[in-house]
Image: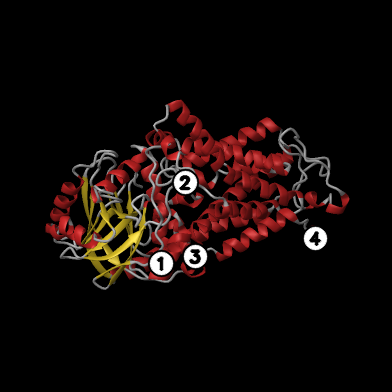
Amino acid sequence: MTTAHQQENEAVSADPGGGEAASVARPEAPASAGAGSAASAGSAARPLPARLACGLAALSGLFYFLGFPGMDLWPISFFGLVPLIVALRGQTPGRAALLGWIAGFVMTMTGFYWLLEMLRVFSGFPTILCALFMAILCAYQAGRIALCGWLYGRAEARGWPGPVAFALAFVTSELVFPLLFPWYYGASVHNAPVMGQVAELGGPYLVGLVLVAANLAIAELVMFRLDRAHPSRGAPGRGRPLNRAVVAVGVAAPALAAVYGVVRMRAVDADAAAAESIKIGIVQPNLALFDRRNAAKIHVSRTRELAKQGAGLVVWSEAGVPQAFRESTYKREVQRSLTSRLGVPTVVGTVIHRFPPNTNERGVSFNTALMAGENGEILGRYDKQYLLAFGEYLPLGDTIPYLYTLSPNSGRFSPGTSLAPLEWNGHRLATMICYEDILPHFVNKLVAQGDPDLLVNLTNDAWFGDTTEPWIHLALAKMRAIEHRRYLVRATNSGVSAIVDPVGRVVVHSDTFKEQSLLGEARFMRARTVYGAVQDTPWYAAAVVSVAMALFTRPARWRRQRAAG
């Protein structure tokens, strides 16, 4: 992302003249709602005591953090949700939402610890106040898993099978809950690419569901043992029978995903071997946030070095050269001052400023990527569309301008509107800026409209310091390469810059917070995938089913059929 300091100085340089938590046991349901339905659905067991349930939820939050990118203990993702699933069983919807929130809060406060540095840099507020803001933000982001818990609790109370209810609630919460910093459980296995290949069928949601299936199977075994040790009054002696279907699905889903992954990786590797190759250079300048005086010098010199090493295309980071260019003359000015000296086609990150006809108005700035040809001519332009709240704009800032005096480092950018790719030499580059590469629905639109043969991302993650955030960002972005079976090139200011192949493996990557040049091979590829074709339509259908299960009681005849079976 880019900043207010950058933006303000750039504009000047362009034109110097211009409630249920107290109850432990589930209350009796009215007869009309099918009071016996929960028992037939396997939820007759008494819910766990409040303290134990809360402790288990917190443990799942910790497991989530440890298994997630950054810590990368990815095998934990196969059982990290088990404590939460066990804790949720039999709880009221309100208690289930609270338990989900506890798990989410622990996960975000640990996994997103780098938010503290970002808030401190942006706001300039004291650290203790930034810690408070971080806690508020994490409390909100924890609402994603709270929503999962609430949908599960409602569905289970209405007699729907718990495992199905949880799986649907989980994918619904990942799909619809709005987040400032999106993430997906499926990214946990980014370092085990064989498990991630199903992303071409259903995106990160399907990868996450494979992991959820394993968690549900283990949770079923745990709850079966608990029920045998402490049978309920309705099922004395041996307790309820083991739900073998849940265990079978939990074993089969990861196994089938792994087999599918092996087969598809071999096939995609063969396709890649036959595709046109190109050496791509990446300039990682490692510029300080508020001191970019040497930006142009570093980019030009390193780009010329990469050209001598055989690079056929070079990519710069987000706003790599922070000088703002007037929209009316930017093509001529960028070529004259920068790209004519490069000697190689280059994707340039910069800022474009549109001056208003009325000098009393502020004008509009865009976070921009430009495609420069071999002679420096500007062939195309892409403006970032998904701006980062509080970083590139302040919510309600245009309505209440005083807010910008409270957060002086926040930018005042406007979103772009075109999804057109950058075109060069018969190739089409789908371009994403900053965190647009972790938004699967947005990249689906880019690919569907532009039919690119290469994915390119320009990013600046320096705001978050030398933390796990740059590695998390890379892990989340890797899914886009698998989903669309294309190479992904990521150029960042301070790391992690990388080239990712179409099965999610990293071909080459940089270190963090080091000035570096990377040179690696990519290939121009086009492929049609199931996820690219259907996009998120099946998952929205699943969300509708999840909500319906939360609102409507399971029909009595379905319960009788289940009991008879």
Above or below, 330 relative to 12: below
Q: Position of residue 530 (x, y in %)?
A: 48, 69
Report the residue marked by disc 3.
201
Q: CA distance from mark 4 to mark 3?
A: 32 Å
User: At 15% across and 59% down in the image, what residue appears?
Assistant: 336
Does the residue at mark 1 contact the one at mark 4 (Cβ under 8 Å)? no
Could you say which disc has been placed on residue 447 in the image? 1
Instruction: Indicate which disc, 1 or 4, sits on the residue closer to the N terminus.
Output: 1
Q: Locate the C terminus and report the quarter of the image it occupies.
A: bottom right
Classify mark 1: residues with Cα within 10 Å, few (<14), some (14-19) or many (20+).
many
Q: CA distance from mark 3 to mark 2?
A: 24 Å
Classify mark 3: residues with Cα within 10 Å, few (<14), some (14-19) or many (20+).
many
Please tell me which residue lies in front, 46 or 461. 461
Q: CA distance from mark 1 to mark 3?
A: 15 Å
Q: Position of residue 284 (x, y in %)?
A: 24, 48
Q: CA distance from mark 2 to mark 4?
A: 39 Å
Judge depth for marks 1 and 3 and give the one in front.
1
> Which amino acid lies under the numbered mark 1 shown in the image of this protein?
Val
Report the residue marked by disc 2.
181
Q: Position of residue 120 (x, y in %)?
A: 40, 33
